[in-house]
Amino acid sequence: MSTVIVWFRRDLRLADNPALTEAARRHERVVALYVHAPGEEGEWAPGAASRWWLHHSLEALDASLARQGGRLEILRGRSIDGLRAAIEATGAAAVYFNRLYEPKAIERDKSVRRALEGDGIEVKSFNAALWVEPWDVATKQDEPYRVFTPFWRNARTRIDEIEVLPEPPLRLPQERYLRDGPLEVADLGLLPKRDWARGFAGWTPGEKGAHELLALFADDAVGHYVEGRDLPARHGTSRLSPHLHWGEISPAQVAAGLRSHAARRPKAADIEPYLRQLGWREFAHHLLYHFPRTPKENFNPKFDAFHWAKPDAHALRRWKKGHTGIPIVDAGMRELWATGWMHNRVRMLVASLLTKNLRQHWVLGEKWFWDTLVDADLANNAMGWQWVAGSGADAAPYFRIFNPVAQSEKFDPEGAYIRRWVPELAKAPGRLVHAPWEDETFLESSGYPPPIVDLKASRDSALMAYQSMRGGRAEAGPARAE
């Protein structure tokens, strides 16, 4: 009886899982294995919010496997040691897994493949995470893309015919094989020791939760996505990002689900704007694969000469806690702390304040997001922070500085989002919900802090730093406040 180990990582689902499907097709018995090895991911091991999600996602996967009569085998330690222990215990002749694209993961997987093949074990890997793998699309000059629009034009032609695989019938061993285990999910110590994550209760990690959220988005929001995605007070986005990160649902499943839903409605919603947003996720992985230093180094080397302010621990602490005195920014940072998530429009605003008005290095914000977002993803996180800082790929032809007051007036005109997350301003009249410092008497009575920085003066300072980097005002190029 041939046995194969399916090595689960961030593909925590049974349906549309090519490694699992191929394992079930080619072998008589499948052993599902998860090896917890955060040390192999270095400083980008999952942050606290991601670990909370992983705990519940592993429990959900174990429950799904139990429906088919098996369990998830869990080990802790180096991946190669766990795989070898499982091979010895089960007599497996093959290991199948789905590919990851972060630099450390690629390095680890190559090492594991060499070691196992040296042991005479068959090793196969598959694509379960992306529409197009980073090496499958290139410019006419056979170079990686650096700009999103031509990348998406190429990638978009490839996604409609991608096959979505059903959940395979599995022959899973009912007995537990591993002599030095097996561990339970709780043994991994993933849950935070403080009560910080109580607000995460609105999430349902796991494959089932992902598909429920997709159905809700298809029913209620996708038809209003273009106008609703920028309004933080509304649930106008899919919120599928953490499910996609942990592989509880694939982008192919998302696209197929939306197409199926649209086909059943006489006035089908245009799903292309949302698919394009998923295309940014693909582009982020394309960039990270080809430019693996972008989580810590400027994509645009000209920004190596940008004059960042000295690290300001006090300002950074106020930013993290949502006490900057800038309402839309504080609302976003408090939403993040309470729920592990922040609306995408607001993510841009909080990042702009930190990197432009406070002129703190974008890596400081990237690391905070990494620890507190349930959808923390190395490719997306690095691309997003560099895009706002101005140092990244696909940057605008001007130095973008968001005006948080103008932005909140435009996208949260009644202040509903601000009033929810900044209760000090719940009764602020009119424009004061966006700029409470304009009435000193109200500001003092509200208990809300004064602004951490003068928005206009700090904007001017950021422009001066940019102009200096570019070699003086004559070469600075245009700037814009949004």
Image: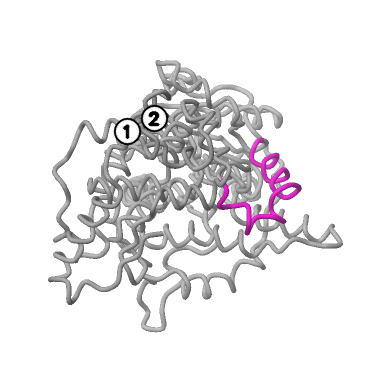
Q: Is residue 314 left or right of residue 101?
A: left
Quadrant occupied by the N terminus? top right
Which SS type dominates the magenta stretch? Answer: helix
Q: Position of residue 111 (x, y in %)?
A: 31, 48
Amino acid at dot 1: Pro
Tag 1, which secondary structure? loop
Q: Are marks 2 and 1 in contact (CB under 8 Å)?
A: yes
Q: Answer whether residue 279 is magenta in the image.
A: no
- The residue at which mark 2 appears reads as 443
Label 2 to label 1, Cα distance in Å? 7 Å
Q: Please give the name of the residue rendered at 72% of the width and 56% of the height, measured from the top-left corner.
A: 223
Look at the image and tell me whether residue 463 can be seen: yes
Disc number at residue 450?
1
Amino acid at dot 2: Leu
Tag 2, which secondary structure? helix
Q: Crowding at label 1, few (<14), some or many (≥20) Cα neighbours within 10 Å?
A: some
Q: Which residues are magenta?
A: 209-231
As drawn, which residue projects farthest toward the bottom? 140
Q: Which of these two is toward me, 59 or 241?
A: 241
Q: Position of residue 247 (x, y in %)?
A: 54, 44
Quadrant occupied by the C terminus? bottom left
Q: Answer whether residue 214 is magenta in the image.
A: yes
Q: Please give the name of the residue rendered at 56% of the width and 47% of the height, measured from the top-left corner.
A: 413
Q: Is residue 106 left or right of residue 237?
A: left
Q: Which of these two is toward me, 445 or 103?
A: 445
Disc number at residue 298?
none
> Between disc 2 and disc 1, whose residue precedes?
2
Residue 175: image quadrant is top right
Q: Position of residue 400 (x, y in %)?
A: 34, 61
